[in-house]
Amino acid sequence: MNDLHGIIFAYRSDANLGELTRPRNTCSLPFGGRYRLVDFMLSNYVNAGITDVGVIVHQSYQSLLDHLGSGKDWELSRRHGGLRILPPFGYAERGGEYRGSMDALAGVADYLENIRQEYVILAWGDMAVNLPVAEVLQQHIDTGADVTMVCTPTLRGAPRFSEYVEVDEEGRVTDLSVHPVAADKTLESLEVYVLSKKLLLDMVDYCAAHDIFNFTRGVLQPRLKTLKLMSYVHQGYVARFQSVSGYFERSMDLLDPAVRDDLFNPDRPIRTKDRSSPSTYYGPDVKSIHSLVADGCLIEGEVENSIISRHVIIEKGAKVSNCVLMQGTVVKSGASLSYVITDKDVTVNQDRMLMGHLTYPLAIAKGSVV
Protein backbone atom coordinates (compact mmCIF):
# COMPACT_ATOMS: atom_id res chain seq x y z
CA MET A 1 0.00 0.00 0.00
CA ASN A 2 2.21 2.78 -1.28
CA ASP A 3 -0.41 5.50 -0.58
CA LEU A 4 -0.16 5.28 3.22
CA HIS A 5 2.62 6.32 5.60
CA GLY A 6 2.64 5.12 9.23
CA ILE A 7 3.40 7.24 12.29
CA ILE A 8 3.58 5.63 15.73
CA PHE A 9 3.58 7.77 18.87
CA ALA A 10 5.98 6.13 21.32
CA TYR A 11 7.12 9.04 23.43
CA ARG A 12 5.38 8.45 26.75
CA SER A 13 6.24 6.37 29.78
CA ASP A 14 2.93 6.04 31.63
CA ALA A 15 3.48 6.53 35.37
CA ASN A 16 0.12 4.86 36.06
CA LEU A 17 1.77 1.54 35.23
CA GLY A 18 4.11 1.96 38.19
CA GLU A 19 7.12 -0.36 38.32
CA LEU A 20 6.33 -1.77 34.88
CA THR A 21 7.25 1.45 33.05
CA ARG A 22 9.89 2.81 35.39
CA PRO A 23 12.73 1.32 33.31
CA ARG A 24 11.09 1.62 29.87
CA ASN A 25 8.80 3.39 27.45
CA THR A 26 5.21 2.10 27.61
CA CYS A 27 5.42 0.86 24.00
CA SER A 28 8.22 -1.54 24.92
CA LEU A 29 6.22 -3.16 27.74
CA PRO A 30 6.26 -6.97 27.32
CA PHE A 31 2.91 -8.63 26.66
CA GLY A 32 1.73 -12.14 26.00
CA GLY A 33 4.99 -13.91 26.84
CA ARG A 34 6.99 -12.96 23.74
CA TYR A 35 5.76 -9.62 22.38
CA ARG A 36 6.19 -5.92 23.11
CA LEU A 37 3.20 -3.61 22.79
CA VAL A 38 4.73 -1.76 19.84
CA ASP A 39 4.72 -5.03 17.86
CA PHE A 40 0.96 -4.86 17.40
CA MET A 41 0.59 -1.48 15.70
CA LEU A 42 3.82 -1.95 13.77
CA SER A 43 2.56 -5.32 12.48
CA ASN A 44 -0.81 -3.76 11.62
CA TYR A 45 0.99 -1.28 9.41
CA VAL A 46 3.16 -3.89 7.73
CA ASN A 47 0.20 -6.22 7.15
CA ALA A 48 -1.49 -3.38 5.25
CA GLY A 49 1.49 -3.02 2.94
CA ILE A 50 2.94 0.11 4.56
CA THR A 51 6.65 0.35 3.79
CA ASP A 52 7.55 3.63 5.56
CA VAL A 53 7.03 4.02 9.32
CA GLY A 54 8.20 6.76 11.65
CA VAL A 55 8.31 6.07 15.40
CA ILE A 56 8.29 9.25 17.51
CA VAL A 57 10.19 8.79 20.78
CA HIS A 58 11.24 11.10 23.59
CA GLN A 59 12.23 9.43 26.86
CA SER A 60 13.23 6.01 28.22
CA TYR A 61 13.41 4.59 24.71
CA GLN A 62 16.64 2.54 24.86
CA SER A 63 14.65 -0.66 25.37
CA LEU A 64 12.49 0.26 22.39
CA LEU A 65 15.55 0.88 20.22
CA ASP A 66 17.04 -2.46 21.21
CA HIS A 67 13.81 -4.22 20.31
CA LEU A 68 13.10 -2.53 16.97
CA GLY A 69 16.67 -2.43 15.70
CA SER A 70 16.71 -1.76 11.96
CA GLY A 71 13.17 -3.05 11.51
CA LYS A 72 14.39 -6.24 9.83
CA ASP A 73 11.95 -8.50 11.69
CA TRP A 74 9.06 -6.46 10.27
CA GLU A 75 10.59 -6.29 6.77
CA LEU A 76 11.21 -2.57 7.25
CA SER A 77 14.98 -2.55 6.83
CA ARG A 78 15.18 -0.77 3.49
CA ARG A 79 17.58 1.38 1.51
CA HIS A 80 14.85 3.99 1.01
CA GLY A 81 12.18 4.57 3.62
CA GLY A 82 11.51 1.67 5.98
CA LEU A 83 11.59 2.12 9.75
CA ARG A 84 12.78 5.47 11.13
CA ILE A 85 13.21 6.25 14.83
CA LEU A 86 12.45 9.95 15.39
CA PRO A 87 14.05 11.30 18.60
CA PRO A 88 13.23 14.80 19.92
CA PHE A 89 16.23 16.61 18.42
CA GLY A 90 14.06 19.22 16.72
CA TYR A 91 12.33 19.89 20.04
CA ALA A 92 15.45 20.09 22.17
CA GLU A 93 15.73 23.88 22.19
CA ARG A 94 12.26 24.19 23.78
CA GLY A 95 13.11 21.71 26.53
CA GLY A 96 10.83 19.46 28.53
CA GLU A 97 8.59 16.65 27.39
CA TYR A 98 6.06 16.67 24.59
CA ARG A 99 2.82 18.12 25.95
CA GLY A 100 0.73 16.27 23.39
CA SER A 101 0.69 14.65 19.97
CA MET A 102 0.73 17.98 18.08
CA ASP A 103 3.86 18.95 19.99
CA ALA A 104 5.39 15.62 18.97
CA LEU A 105 4.46 16.12 15.30
CA ALA A 106 5.86 19.65 15.34
CA GLY A 107 9.09 18.21 16.73
CA VAL A 108 9.48 16.03 13.62
CA ALA A 109 8.10 18.54 11.10
CA ASP A 110 11.06 18.13 8.74
CA TYR A 111 10.39 14.39 8.57
CA LEU A 112 6.71 14.98 7.82
CA GLU A 113 7.58 17.32 4.95
CA ASN A 114 9.49 14.51 3.25
CA ILE A 115 6.74 11.88 3.45
CA ARG A 116 6.27 10.36 -0.01
CA GLN A 117 2.74 9.02 0.44
CA GLU A 118 -0.56 10.84 0.01
CA TYR A 119 -2.12 9.60 3.26
CA VAL A 120 -0.84 9.23 6.83
CA ILE A 121 -2.07 7.06 9.68
CA LEU A 122 -1.36 8.25 13.23
CA ALA A 123 -1.57 5.79 16.14
CA TRP A 124 -0.20 5.09 19.59
CA GLY A 125 2.03 2.07 19.94
CA ASP A 126 0.93 1.09 23.45
CA MET A 127 -2.18 -1.01 22.80
CA ALA A 128 -2.75 -4.55 21.59
CA VAL A 129 -5.11 -4.76 18.62
CA ASN A 130 -5.17 -6.54 15.27
CA LEU A 131 -6.50 -3.75 13.08
CA PRO A 132 -7.32 -4.12 9.35
CA VAL A 133 -5.56 -0.90 8.40
CA ALA A 134 -6.20 -1.46 4.68
CA GLU A 135 -9.96 -1.42 5.35
CA VAL A 136 -9.64 1.78 7.37
CA LEU A 137 -7.89 3.54 4.49
CA GLN A 138 -10.38 2.25 1.94
CA GLN A 139 -13.31 3.52 3.99
CA HIS A 140 -11.53 6.85 4.40
CA ILE A 141 -11.24 7.20 0.62
CA ASP A 142 -14.74 5.90 -0.14
CA THR A 143 -16.46 8.29 2.28
CA GLY A 144 -14.41 11.33 1.26
CA ALA A 145 -13.55 11.98 4.91
CA ASP A 146 -11.11 14.64 6.00
CA VAL A 147 -10.19 12.51 9.01
CA THR A 148 -11.18 8.93 9.83
CA MET A 149 -10.88 7.91 13.47
CA VAL A 150 -10.91 4.30 14.65
CA CYS A 151 -13.32 3.50 17.48
CA THR A 152 -14.45 0.46 19.44
CA PRO A 153 -17.87 -0.34 20.91
CA THR A 154 -16.16 -2.19 23.77
CA LEU A 155 -15.53 0.44 26.46
CA ARG A 156 -12.45 -0.71 28.36
CA GLY A 157 -10.42 2.40 29.04
CA ALA A 158 -10.67 4.33 32.30
CA PRO A 159 -12.82 7.40 31.49
CA ARG A 160 -10.30 9.84 32.98
CA PHE A 161 -7.72 8.64 30.43
CA SER A 162 -10.02 7.99 27.46
CA GLU A 163 -11.90 9.73 24.66
CA TYR A 164 -15.45 8.96 23.52
CA VAL A 165 -17.47 9.77 20.41
CA GLU A 166 -21.04 10.05 19.24
CA VAL A 167 -21.87 9.39 15.58
CA ASP A 168 -24.89 9.83 13.35
CA GLU A 169 -26.50 7.13 11.19
CA GLU A 170 -23.85 7.62 8.48
CA GLY A 171 -20.96 7.20 10.92
CA ARG A 172 -20.02 10.88 10.99
CA VAL A 173 -18.71 12.04 14.36
CA THR A 174 -21.09 14.54 15.96
CA ASP A 175 -19.52 14.87 19.41
CA LEU A 176 -16.21 14.19 21.15
CA SER A 177 -15.62 13.87 24.89
CA VAL A 178 -12.09 13.96 26.29
CA HIS A 179 -11.39 12.41 29.71
CA PRO A 180 -14.96 12.70 31.08
CA VAL A 181 -15.99 11.67 34.58
CA ALA A 182 -17.98 8.75 33.16
CA ALA A 183 -18.16 6.98 29.80
CA ASP A 184 -21.50 8.26 28.54
CA LYS A 185 -20.93 7.71 24.80
CA THR A 186 -21.48 4.63 22.69
CA LEU A 187 -17.98 4.41 21.18
CA GLU A 188 -14.49 4.73 22.60
CA SER A 189 -11.82 6.32 20.45
CA LEU A 190 -8.64 4.31 19.94
CA GLU A 191 -6.85 7.54 18.97
CA VAL A 192 -5.98 6.10 15.55
CA TYR A 193 -6.47 8.55 12.69
CA VAL A 194 -6.14 8.52 8.90
CA LEU A 195 -5.84 11.80 7.00
CA SER A 196 -4.03 13.28 4.03
CA LYS A 197 -0.44 14.46 4.30
CA LYS A 198 -1.50 17.93 3.16
CA LEU A 199 -4.13 18.27 5.88
CA LEU A 200 -1.71 16.95 8.50
CA LEU A 201 0.96 19.51 7.56
CA ASP A 202 -1.61 22.31 7.65
CA MET A 203 -2.72 21.20 11.11
CA VAL A 204 0.86 20.98 12.41
CA ASP A 205 1.68 24.48 11.12
CA TYR A 206 -1.50 25.96 12.59
CA CYS A 207 -0.99 24.30 15.98
CA ALA A 208 2.67 25.34 16.18
CA ALA A 209 1.72 28.96 15.42
CA HIS A 210 -1.09 28.98 18.02
CA ASP A 211 0.62 26.91 20.75
CA ILE A 212 -1.93 24.09 20.44
CA PHE A 213 -0.50 20.75 21.58
CA ASN A 214 -3.49 18.39 21.88
CA PHE A 215 -4.92 16.85 18.69
CA THR A 216 -8.41 16.06 19.95
CA ARG A 217 -9.05 19.16 22.07
CA GLY A 218 -7.10 21.59 19.93
CA VAL A 219 -7.87 20.38 16.41
CA LEU A 220 -10.83 18.01 16.21
CA GLN A 221 -13.27 19.39 18.78
CA PRO A 222 -13.23 22.97 17.44
CA ARG A 223 -13.66 21.72 13.85
CA LEU A 224 -16.40 19.12 14.22
CA LYS A 225 -18.70 21.17 11.97
CA THR A 226 -16.10 22.11 9.36
CA LEU A 227 -14.16 18.84 9.07
CA LYS A 228 -15.76 15.67 7.77
CA LEU A 229 -14.76 13.45 10.67
CA MET A 230 -15.83 9.84 10.08
CA SER A 231 -15.66 6.85 12.42
CA TYR A 232 -14.39 3.37 11.62
CA VAL A 233 -15.81 0.95 14.16
CA HIS A 234 -13.45 -1.93 14.93
CA GLN A 235 -15.41 -4.92 16.25
CA GLY A 236 -12.41 -7.01 17.30
CA TYR A 237 -10.53 -7.32 20.58
CA VAL A 238 -8.68 -4.29 21.94
CA ALA A 239 -6.38 -4.16 24.97
CA ARG A 240 -5.45 -0.81 26.46
CA PHE A 241 -2.99 -0.41 29.33
CA GLN A 242 -3.65 2.42 31.78
CA SER A 243 -2.92 0.81 35.15
CA VAL A 244 -1.15 -2.16 36.71
CA SER A 245 -4.45 -3.94 37.33
CA GLY A 246 -5.50 -3.22 33.73
CA TYR A 247 -2.27 -4.74 32.44
CA PHE A 248 -2.89 -7.84 34.55
CA GLU A 249 -6.50 -8.20 33.38
CA ARG A 250 -5.61 -7.82 29.69
CA SER A 251 -2.81 -10.37 30.12
CA MET A 252 -5.27 -12.83 31.63
CA ASP A 253 -7.58 -12.24 28.64
CA LEU A 254 -5.04 -14.12 26.54
CA LEU A 255 -5.96 -17.35 28.29
CA ASP A 256 -9.27 -17.18 26.38
CA PRO A 257 -8.86 -18.96 23.01
CA ALA A 258 -11.36 -16.59 21.36
CA VAL A 259 -9.24 -13.59 22.32
CA ARG A 260 -6.07 -15.24 21.01
CA ASP A 261 -7.79 -16.17 17.74
CA ASP A 262 -8.84 -12.55 17.20
CA LEU A 263 -5.63 -10.87 18.31
CA PHE A 264 -3.30 -13.30 16.55
CA ASN A 265 -5.25 -13.68 13.33
CA PRO A 266 -3.01 -15.75 10.98
CA ASP A 267 -4.19 -13.64 8.03
CA ARG A 268 -2.68 -10.59 9.74
CA PRO A 269 0.22 -12.01 11.79
CA ILE A 270 1.74 -10.12 14.70
CA ARG A 271 5.51 -10.04 14.28
CA THR A 272 8.17 -9.52 16.92
CA LYS A 273 11.93 -9.56 17.27
CA ASP A 274 13.32 -12.98 16.45
CA ARG A 275 14.85 -14.60 19.53
CA SER A 276 15.55 -18.20 18.65
CA SER A 277 15.21 -20.29 21.80
CA PRO A 278 15.12 -24.01 22.50
CA SER A 279 11.83 -25.65 23.40
CA THR A 280 10.62 -25.35 26.97
CA TYR A 281 11.60 -28.23 29.25
CA TYR A 282 8.90 -29.69 31.50
CA GLY A 283 10.08 -31.86 34.39
CA PRO A 284 8.61 -35.32 35.01
CA ASP A 285 6.45 -34.17 37.92
CA VAL A 286 5.40 -30.81 36.50
CA LYS A 287 1.81 -29.54 36.73
CA SER A 288 0.87 -26.98 34.08
CA ILE A 289 -2.79 -26.00 33.72
CA HIS A 290 -4.45 -23.34 31.53
CA SER A 291 -1.29 -21.31 30.95
CA LEU A 292 0.69 -19.78 28.10
CA VAL A 293 4.37 -20.70 28.28
CA ALA A 294 6.95 -19.27 25.88
CA ASP A 295 10.06 -21.00 24.51
CA GLY A 296 13.26 -21.50 26.43
CA CYS A 297 11.74 -22.06 29.89
CA LEU A 298 12.55 -24.64 32.55
CA ILE A 299 9.36 -25.71 34.32
CA GLU A 300 9.62 -28.24 37.15
CA GLY A 301 7.03 -26.84 39.58
CA GLU A 302 3.33 -26.03 39.32
CA VAL A 303 1.89 -23.42 36.94
CA GLU A 304 -1.78 -22.51 36.69
CA ASN A 305 -3.66 -19.69 34.90
CA SER A 306 -0.44 -17.82 34.14
CA ILE A 307 1.51 -16.12 31.35
CA ILE A 308 5.15 -17.27 31.31
CA SER A 309 7.71 -15.45 29.16
CA ARG A 310 10.95 -16.75 27.65
CA HIS A 311 13.75 -18.15 29.81
CA VAL A 312 11.69 -18.34 33.01
CA ILE A 313 12.76 -20.96 35.55
CA ILE A 314 10.24 -22.44 37.97
CA GLU A 315 12.01 -24.90 40.22
CA LYS A 316 10.61 -28.11 41.66
CA GLY A 317 8.26 -27.45 44.56
CA ALA A 318 7.48 -23.88 43.46
CA LYS A 319 3.85 -22.88 42.81
CA VAL A 320 2.76 -20.13 40.42
CA SER A 321 -0.92 -19.29 39.91
CA ASN A 322 -2.63 -16.34 38.26
CA CYS A 323 0.68 -14.65 37.51
CA VAL A 324 2.50 -12.85 34.71
CA LEU A 325 6.22 -13.70 34.76
CA MET A 326 8.42 -11.75 32.38
CA GLN A 327 11.66 -12.87 30.75
CA GLY A 328 14.38 -14.27 32.96
CA THR A 329 12.29 -14.63 36.13
CA VAL A 330 13.51 -17.36 38.50
CA VAL A 331 11.12 -18.86 41.06
CA LYS A 332 13.06 -21.07 43.42
CA SER A 333 11.87 -24.22 45.14
CA GLY A 334 9.21 -23.83 47.80
CA ALA A 335 8.21 -20.33 46.66
CA SER A 336 4.53 -19.57 46.12
CA LEU A 337 3.23 -16.77 43.88
CA SER A 338 -0.37 -15.71 43.32
CA TYR A 339 -1.62 -12.63 41.44
CA VAL A 340 1.93 -11.40 40.91
CA ILE A 341 3.59 -9.61 37.97
CA THR A 342 7.36 -10.00 37.86
CA ASP A 343 9.35 -7.77 35.54
CA LYS A 344 12.45 -9.05 33.72
CA ASP A 345 15.21 -10.85 35.62
CA VAL A 346 13.41 -11.06 38.97
CA THR A 347 14.50 -13.77 41.41
CA VAL A 348 12.11 -15.09 44.03
CA ASN A 349 14.09 -16.99 46.64
CA GLN A 350 13.25 -20.27 48.32
CA ASP A 351 10.08 -20.55 50.38
CA ARG A 352 8.98 -16.97 49.73
CA MET A 353 5.24 -16.31 49.49
CA LEU A 354 4.02 -13.40 47.35
CA MET A 355 0.30 -12.75 47.06
CA GLY A 356 -1.66 -9.98 45.40
CA HIS A 357 -5.29 -9.77 44.36
CA LEU A 358 -7.20 -9.75 41.07
CA THR A 359 -7.93 -6.03 41.46
CA TYR A 360 -4.55 -5.21 43.01
CA PRO A 361 -1.83 -7.49 41.63
CA LEU A 362 1.62 -7.27 43.14
CA ALA A 363 4.20 -5.86 40.68
CA ILE A 364 7.88 -6.66 41.27
CA ALA A 365 10.42 -4.27 39.71
CA LYS A 366 12.95 -5.36 37.10
CA GLY A 367 15.99 -7.10 38.47
CA SER A 368 14.63 -7.44 42.02
CA VAL A 369 15.64 -10.23 44.37
CA VAL A 370 12.83 -11.13 46.74
Image (cartoon, rainbow, N blue to C red):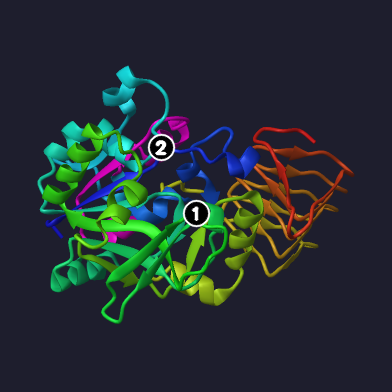
Q: Nearer the viewer, residue 215 or 258?
A: 215
Task: Give the residues drawn in magenta, as a range.
Answer: 43-71
Q: Is residue 280 visible?
A: no
Report the side of 143 relative to 20 (left or right): left
Q: Residues within 10 Å of mark 2 (few under 14, many from 20)?
A: many
Q: Position of residue 178 (x, y in %)?
A: 44, 55
Reading the image, the residue beneath label 1 is: 179
* Residue occupying image coordinates x 27% and y 72%: 172
Separation of marks 2 and 1 at Cα, in angstroms: 20 Å
Report the side of 122 relative to 277 (left or right): left
* Residue occupying image coordinates x 45% and y 67%: 263
Picture disc at residue 139: none
Q: Secondary structure at mark 2?
A: loop
Which circle's residue, 2 or 1, is located before the other in the chain? 2
Q: Residue furthest top?
A: 93
Q: How many marks?
A: 2
Q: Position of residue 116 (x, y in %)?
A: 10, 46
Q: Is residue 303 magenta?
A: no
Q: Quadrant of the N terminus?
A: bottom left
